[in-house]
Amino acid sequence: MINLSEVSETNEMINKENLDVRTITMGISLYDCAGEDLARVCDRILEKITRKAGRLVEVGEHISKSYGIPVVNKRIAVTPISSIGSSCCKSEEDYVKLALTLEKAAQETGVNLIGGYGAVISKGMTDHEKIFLRSIPEALKVTRSVCSSVNVGSTRTGINMDAVRMMGEIIVDTAKASYGTDSLGCAKLVVFCNAPDDNPFMAGAFHGVSEGEAVINVGISGPGVVKKALEGLHGASFEVLCEAIKKTAFKITRVGQLVATEAAKRLDVPFGIVDLSLAPTPAVGDSVADILKEIGLEHPGAPGTTAALALLNDQVKKGGVMASSYVGGLSGAFIPVSEDKGMIEAVEAGALSLEKLEAMTCVCSVGLDMIAIPGDTPATTISGIIADEMAIGMINQKTTAVRLIPAIGKKVGESLDFGGLFGYSPVMPVNTFSCSDFIGREGRIPAPIHSFKN
């Protein structure tokens, strides 16, 4: 039974502490759209997405008005397009036509973003998948709403280093292709290890092979709410600190569960998961970095940062799983640089380096996210950064990701400005020592010994 004090407390979270449902994401299977005729495949994809998700935006806005809970984004995730296009796409240009079909579907349904222009190639690549990968720069250039994700490793299969090498080159090509928009295409491209099938957050959302015909997943965020809960706890013990975070995460997750259940009922689509991720925005008061400051750090990057982030991430998960039996996706704390005002300030103050961010990814929800690097960074160096992050995910049996943005024509100290949710980012320095001989090796890094549990 919800009492009046809990209602008042939730209203306070929404009105003053930036609590929102970051996204309602409908996952849609496109397997029944596949075929050998590209034009017919495009028609079937457009028809199915618009039929399934035609009311998604309307329902999201109605729930927001009915409950007074901001529902910021309405999104769609589809089956990885590399699989759907394997029979009908003979060239990069053919795959780009599928991307344009997804873009048209996004426009007709009115969603903010559509994910799934991607591939799962953690062990090897087919010839069709290689063609698909080479289509990504052009596909992200000619579309506004389409997001791409590529899974190149897992704890069970190891790391596909041929794919890692290609993705370094593709990230550079994507940055060059979207040069006129501050390399915005790279903000819609993420490389994963251990990608979850049910992630509602872009750019990594796709409808996994283990999913049904359609599903509703909700991503909820509340960095400002957690920060507020810690403001009166200066000098308190770690036990008190942990309880405050856990209880707050519980309350936030209950809001997400309500919205997810209601959306699923109104759309007649099964409810999947609530992803409780503290996903920041460039807005003041909506920062994971500010939570770390409340815990006791002058800036993220100071000694103790990794421990503080581990504490935060764990308590968020503990609170979430007590509130819902269906917590999934990524769930935890995100640390994107460009999307978090406090992280940007830490970089500008010299407190936060790429190496420290990498250490932090060992204990947070995702990985090296929305980081601008010098535009002349070699593709092999980018591949090396990807390989390091994939290794963290593979060995630690967790999801890790890389979303790097080579700032073409810009150097350390300058900045990129994407606007909106993507924010802006100072260009961060990258280690200039070469790893090209390492990246030039063919094959894959084998799975770790603890992966064999059959």
Image: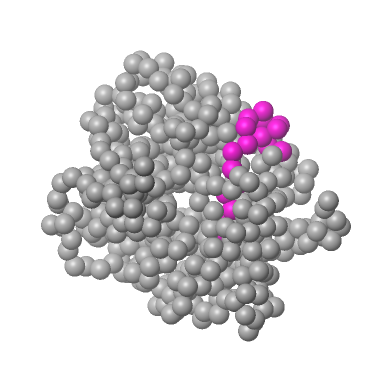
Q: Is residue 424 left or right of residue 54?
A: left
Let me know if residue 266 is in the magenta part. Answer: yes
Residue 333 visible, this angle: yes
Q: Is residue 174 left or right of residue 432?
A: right
Residue at 40% in and 63% down: 362
Residue 428 % position (x, y): 35, 67
Residue 169 visible, this angle: no
Residue at 59% in and 53% down: 276
* Residue with the most extreme bottom position: 235
Q: Is residue 15 left or right of residue 423?
A: right
In the image, is residue 46 above or below residue 117?
above
Instruction: Choose top left, top right, bottom left or bottom right for residue 358.
Output: bottom left
Residue at 44% in and 32% down: 209
* Residue with the most extreme right position: 4
Let me know if residue 115 is in the magenta part. Answer: no
* The one of 125 and 202 positioned closer to us in this rendering: 125
**Quadrant (top left/top right/bottom left/bottom right) for the C terminus:** top left
Start and end of the magenta stretch? 262-282
Residue 413 % position (x, y): 36, 71
Residue at 37% in and 17% down: 35
In the image, is residue 203 above or below residue 241?
above
Residue 196 % position (x, y): 46, 44
Colour style of the rendered protein structure:
one colour
Instruction: Choose top left, top right, bottom left or bottom right for residue 177.
Output: top left
Instruction: Choose top left, top right, bottom left or bottom right for residue 261.
Output: top right
Residue 105 % position (x, y): 51, 29
* Residue with the most extreme front position: 454
